[in-house]
Amino acid sequence: MNRPTRSFKLRLSRQGMDLLIDAHCHLIRATRRLLAWGTTLHVAVAHLETLPAELLVDELAVVGRAGLAGGEEHHLGAPTSLVGLAGAIADRVSGARKDMAAPSLGSIYLLALHILATADQTSLQATYEKTKVS
């Protein structure tokens, strides 16, 4: 059975594109599988879901200053459930900091890639196994 997918838009700077490439290669090394770019985004967001909201708040500030967002538009095919997962993370982050507006989905995607790029390979393998379709 195929999962329904849609195209997710990432607006990246040159540094943001480098981050996407680094995260993608890191996940490929962790899983030892050739993966689609959208799978990297899906696993990155699923991995983000496992982390405490306070850590995500701190890391959002780092990602915001890193200049990862930009004018180059890139489209990645990922499961339609990704938007709900990212939205729930954004709500959780804003709930952890009442003085902070919910981050945009684009910020959540960049944060997820940022964290995935250096995450422990064992935890990435486990997250990949949970997200893949049989």
Image (spheres, rainbow, N blue to C red):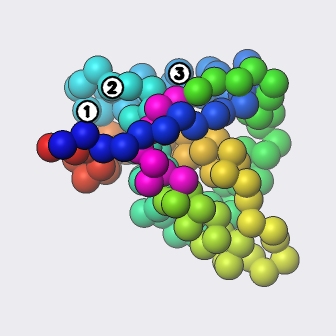
Instruction: Give x and y (percent) for residue 77.
Output: 47, 32
- Magenta segment boundaries in residue numbering: 76-83
Query: Which residue matches tag 1?
Result: 31
Q: Magenta stretch: residue 61 in it?
A: no
Alpha carbon separation for disc pair 2 and 1: 9 Å
Say which element carries label 2.
Answer: loop
The amino acid type found where label 3 is placed reads Ile
User: Which numbered disc, 1 or 3, marks the residue that appears first in the sequence?
Assistant: 3
- Residue 70, label in figure: none
Badge 1 density bin: few <14, some 14–19, many ≥20, Cα 10 Å:
some
What is the residue that sits farthest to the left in this orientation? Answer: 134
**Residue depicted at x 56% and y 67%:** 88
Query: Which residue matches tag 2?
Result: 35
Answer with the quarter of the image where residue 30 lies: top left
Q: Is residue 88 visible?
A: yes
The amino acid type found where label 2 is placed reads Leu
Query: Which residue matches tag 3?
Result: 21
Residues marked 3 and 2 touching at CB (< 8 Å): no
Answer with the quarter of the image where residue 75 lies: top right
Which image quarter holds the C terminus? top left
Badge 3 density bin: few <14, some 14–19, many ≥20, Cα 10 Å:
some
Q: Is residue 54 visible?
A: no
Q: Magenta stretch: residue 81 in it?
A: yes
Relative side of 128 to 67, left or right = left
Badge 2 density bin: few <14, some 14–19, many ≥20, Cα 10 Å:
few
